[in-house]
Amino acid sequence: MSDLDAFRAEIRAWLEENCPPEMREPAREEDDACWGGRNFKFKNEAQKQWLERCAAKGYTVPDWPKAYGGAGMNAAQAKVWREEMHRINARAPLSSFGIWMLGPALLKFGTEEQKVHYLGQIARGEIRWCQGYSEPGSGSDLVSLQTFGEDKGDHWVVNGQKIWTSYANKADWIFCLVRTDKGNKYQGISFLLFDMTTPGVSTKPILLISGSSPFCETFFDNVVVPKDQIVGELNCGWDVAKYLLGHEREMISGAGGNDRLNTIGAVLNRAGLEDPLLRADLAQFDVDALAFSAMGEKFLDEIKVGKAHPAQPNMMKYAGTELNKRRYELLMAGGGSASLEWESEASDGGARARTWLRTKANSIEGGTSEVMLNVISKRILDLPGA
Amino acid sequence: MPLYHTEDQAMLADTARQFMGEEGAIAKQLRHWRDTNCKDGFGHGLWKQFAELGFTGILVGEADGGLGMGHVEAGIVLEEIGRNLTPSPFLTSSVMAATALGSASADLRGRWLPGLLTGDSVFAVAVDEGPKHRPERIKTRAERAGNGFKLNGAKAFVLHGGSADMLVVAARTAGLDDDDAGITLFAVPKDVAGLSQDKVRLVDSSMATHVKLDNVTLDADAVIGEVDGGREVLNRMLQAGRVGAAAESVGVAAGAFDMTTTYLKQRKQFGRLIGEFQSLQHRAAHLYSEVEIARAATIKAQQLLDGGSVRADLMVSVAKAKAGKAASLAVKEGVQMHGGIGMTDEYDIGLYMKRDRALAEFMGDQYYHADRVARLSGY
Ligand SMILES: Cc1cc2nc3c(=O)[nH]c(=O)nc-3n(C[C@H](O)[C@H](O)[C@H](O)COP(=O)(O)OP(=O)(O)OC[C@H]3O[C@@H](n4cnc5c(N)ncnc54)[C@H](O)[C@@H]3O)c2cc1C
């Protein structure tokens, strides 16, 4: 048996023993995901157990170093971990912006002290993070952001407003882009971390078309941020921000997601399939989806060893999110009038329609499809004037 | 016949546009009824105003006290309904049920049409039996019983069923589930014993019902048209509904398109109006083309239907499929080009997306109608 086979056997046995049966069912609702944090209420005992067992082994962040709460897996081992998780349909023990976004940025730009402190909290699901990037006037043109941090010697005083801050009302801490030099556009932004309970921070939820309020307007009124809560150098936050966005886009692309391997025809009831043209569209979708799942696997294999183009996450995000939107269009069509139901018990409170609407944000959040295409044109294709 | 509106039709369009833009506006109607959790999903006051303008009887013959107009005119009203997302039972009552009642006995017409003309009555149609539109298959049975009929079966996606005074029910009086012949239409009063309705709110905040018919006993005079010969009336009613839904979709597309182009001229990023980016300009221009084409197909279908042409069937399916595709594109582009704000409930563009989804499904989606176009073209 090769080392990797032995490793697989070990993982398989551990999962068999430790992954509760309830955690092997597909997540259906938003609160089926475990987000962790100070105020998180576990939906059930299984969810809590699953987090604790994984955290104890470093499996919430399998490829982070052991010193920072991970399991220290190399790329090949991490892939085995993903495959074995998918094999039993296991849910992620922990969903978190800390894992997907801040963690990778800290691993690259953080001080040793910051890594030990923040990464450990993230890996154990103790602190829930939110992302303070977008502002009312600065969405696609993020670098024009205005939230200002005034230098007061050993701390900054931050004033301004963010918008579309996902889960700001549930998060414990925020990673936030703050202008620290008004005279310098790109080299005038710093990447700050602070506690959402700091005086002067307030949030106001925004209602989404799906009927839930997962994001907020976030206001900063003379918020004091100590100087040691900066990641990277002063005024070099844009580099951290961009690096983090690469990871965010990789996550949103759904590369490596396990639901993609089921053909869409298989999840629909037969009513939709009786129509030959709808069936044809479903089949065309499945061609694209299965091809994309191969792309996702290839991309993850390559990026872990530095073989992917550094701008490739933009392509992945573009293709993956457009595909996911199409997937839900087809699920709605396949479900027919039953999928239009918004509140009924039979429709699980309109679950499908609400998810369908939520997917429309996939090509907006984390940078719009248009921005992705602009970046591909510029950084990968090197097109003139792009 | 020219494919543009006559002077009279243009005047009607002005009236409808002004009325729907003011009285039927999103804040005043859709949001109001949605946010107050209205069990009808529309306002009866507005329905009375429809009646005062003559809209409720637009397809009702002059001899019966209606305006005696055609599908072009009904479509004019529906496009404005679509543009303003105005919730009303117009499509099911004044377009579909009224078309069916056009083939009914003088007694039935006398019983139901006066309430429609005054805006006191609301009608619904109960045809589909599963989650997809498939009127070729009707399982609901009506058996002869005494002097009348006994109905048993179930119907799905009955828009406004819970608010309706009368439901036009398609049932089988002879033959097998998939037979073309053997269909009979019934005018079923809401309070008849054995009729039960389970109300559901839909994604666009309209109300529909799942209908159960459990030994519903009706007199023979509840039959619309001929016993066993109802397929023809049913088809006429469906065609009216399809071309009407197409017109409403064109309105939804136009409304979403207008909101979006307005936004392109307002929102600034990178120091420029986003409408200055050529990639968005081209998509807006493409969308414009699609909406124009959808409107043309819809007017053509309306005219053919009004003229009793043999090509009407084909063009009605073309119109329903094309308008559905154009509206679907318009709402997707609309949300996307609005960015984050497009995902918020506060902004109206998402309401267009919801309405489009429900309309797309009503009376057959683009797949159903594209398939129909293929069949009618002999392949
Ligand atoms: C569900 C959801 C969750 C989010 N969560 C967060 C979060 O947690 N934290 C956070 O900071 N932000 C978050 N966002 C915000 C998101 O990053 C922004 O919405 C996004 O970057 C777009 O910005 P905008 O909304 O201002 O749109 P705009 O930038 O105003 O864009 C409007 C339209 O113009 C297009 N456009 C803009 N520039 C160009 C160009 N140069 N060429 C062509 N087209 C262009 C856009 O693609 C879009 O279609 C979230 C958004 C959503 C929808």
Image (spheres, rainbow, N blue to C red):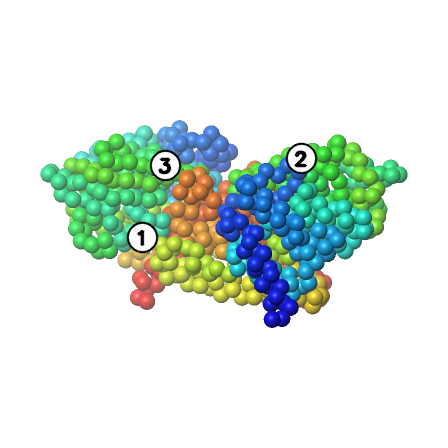
Q: Is residue A95 left or right of residue A384?
A: left
Hey, which quadrant is residue A341 in on the image?
top left
**Left or right relative to B187: residue A372:** right
Task: State which mark lies toward you, 3 or 1.
Answer: 3
Residue A303, above or below B226: below
Q: Position of residue A98 (x, y in %)?
A: 68, 48
Q: Which mark is residue A203?
A: 2
Chain of the residue under the numbered disc 1 shown in the image:
B
Q: Which residue is mark 1?
A: B134
Picture quadrant where residue B178 is located: bottom left
- For image coordinates 75% across by 34% down, the residue present is A198
Mark 3 or 1, nearer chain start: 1
Q: Chain of mark 2?
A: A
Marks 1 and 2, how far apart at CA: 49 Å
Q: Evaluate whether residue A191 shows in this view.
A: no
Which residue appears at 50% of the width and 44% of the height?
A354
Disc 3, SS: strand
Q: Which mark is residue B199?
A: 3
